[in-house]
Structure formats: structure tokens, C-alpha cells
Image (spheres, rainbow, N blue to C red):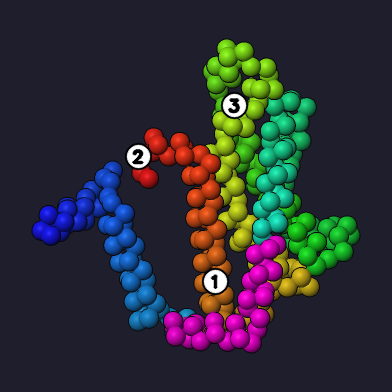
Amino acid sequence: MNGNGNGVWFELKNAFAPNRAISKRTLGIFITFWIACAFLIWIYWAPDIIPRPLEVFQSFISLYQNEGLAFELWKSLMTNFQVVALSTVLSLLICYSTAMPIMRPVAEALSKARFLGLTGLLVIFMSVFAGGHSLKLALMTFGMSAFNIANMSNVLERITKNQKDHARTLRMSEWEVVWEVHVRGTLDKAFDVIRDNAAIGWMMLTMVEGLVRSGGGIGKLLLDENKHLNLGAVFAIQFIIITVGLIQDYGWGGLKNLACPHAGLTLDRR
């Protein structure tokens, strides 16, 4: 008992020293501490305009019972799933095809599209797509693919000549080199790129659902409540958005660990 207590106390002291490792138990203590601090600040010291926890909880119940929160959230989740799948497949195909020099200008040009605002492209996309779900899907896929291509291109550009030469010494053809070095060799980094851009996409989705209101979704519900200054409901929806985002993020991290268990073996902080 005393030994365990001394061990925890030693780890707590280590938390204030640089480059020290701590156990998951101690990390849990720190997380609990900071969450408690955040709630205390929220309850006692937040500005009066910010709704308190009880008001947010009551708004959540009202949204669920009267505003179709569950249905709108489900529509957003399905849209997000489709967007992540489409943008991942399209962007990875384009990036891996840059092994052929003819495709490199295409990938470079598409990566620059990440600087374009989706609002300014709405009219163009509306002329091609009817509206509603298909319009949201197209806007989101375009936006996320641009970020995916930019980030994954950076990963592929860091592949060294030695890595390719090593594959060639194993008597691999050039297409086998592409498969082993470009695709399999960067799979763990591809998961990181997808994970980061999935978070960006989930954040962008609420904005796109506000632009394309006919398709519904949690973003439309958020803007409706914000328009009527129902801040309790706004905070409730924001908590749902961040909770779903965290679950999605941990899910991608779990998939990476399953597909690439070797990726974290050499890391100091795991």
C-alpha cells in the first residue's frame, strides 16, 4: 500500500520535470484534475452570458425530445463517413500516382485548392449538383481532398533515395518499389494524415450544412439555435460535436495501431 502510494507520489513529482514518463493511472489523475478545474471555472467564474452546466443539460434533453437531435446527428455522421471514404480514396490514388512525373503537376495544383473558400465555390457546385445531400458531399469531398493531397504529398516527398535503392537491391521492379516504399512504407503516416483531415472535415461539416441547409444535419440545427440566441442549446450541440470528434479521433488512432503496430515502438512518449 505504502509502496504504491510512494510510486504515485514519485510520478506526480516527475510530472513537473521535463522528459519523464508517467503511468496511465497518473495520467488519468491529471486528466481528472484538469477537467475538474475547467468545470469549477465554468460554474463559478465564467461570464454571465455563458450558460451553466444545468442549463446546457436541460437544453440537450429538449433538443433530443423536440428538435430531432438524434436524427440530425445521424445524417451528419453518415455524410461525414461518406466524405472521409471518398476523399481518402481519391486523394491517395492521386498522391500515389505521383510516382509518375506526369501526375506531379496535377497533385500540386489540386493541393493549392485548400486555399479556396467553399462559400465562393457554392454557385459553381450548385450548377453541377442538384443540391441537398449530393451538394454537401461534393463540397466536403473537394475541400478535404485538397488537404489530404497536400499533406500526403509532403509525406511522399520525404522518401529518401536510399529507401528506394534498398528496395531495388532486392530485385524489385519499379512498380514493386512504388508498392513497398510509397504505399506500404508510408501506411502509418497515411493514417496520421487521414486522422488529422477527418478532424478538419468534421469541423467543416457544420459550416457546409449551414451553407446547404436543405440537407439538414447538426450544423443546420446549430445555426438555427444560434440565430435565436439559444446559447444553452448551442453549447449542448457543441459538446456533442466535440464528443463525436474525439470518438472519431480515437477510432482512427485504434485503426492505425491495428494496421501498423510497429509505428509506435520507437516513440519516447506513447
Q: Amino acid at mark 2?
A: Asp
Q: Amino acid at mark 3?
A: Val
Asked if the residue under mark 2 is in contact with the one under mark 1, i.e. CB atoms within 8 Å, the reply is no
Q: Which mark is residue 268?
A: 2
Secondary structure of residue under mark 1: helix
Q: Locate residue 25, reporting x and y percent.
A: 28, 57
Question: Hey, which quadrant is residue 264 in on the image?
Answer: top left
User: What is the spatial separation of the Cα atoms under label 2 and label 3, in whole angstroms?
Assistant: 25 Å
Q: Amino acid at mark 1?
A: Ile
Q: Quadrant of the C terminus?
A: top left
Of 149 and 170, nearer the camera is 170
Question: Which span of residues is magenta-colored?
Answer: 51-79
Task: Let me know if residue 108 is in the magenta part.
Answer: no
- Secondary structure mostly seen in magenta is helix
User: What is the spatial separation of the Cα atoms under label 3 and label 1, in whole angstroms?
Assistant: 40 Å
**Mark 1 lies on residue:** 240
Q: Locate residue 206, reporting x and y percent.
A: 65, 67
Is 17 placed above or below 155 here? below
Question: Hey, which quadrant is residue 97 in on the image?
Answer: top right
Residue mark closest to the camera, 2 vs 3? 3
User: Residue drawn 68% across and 17% down?
Assistant: 173
**Mark 3 lies on residue:** 181
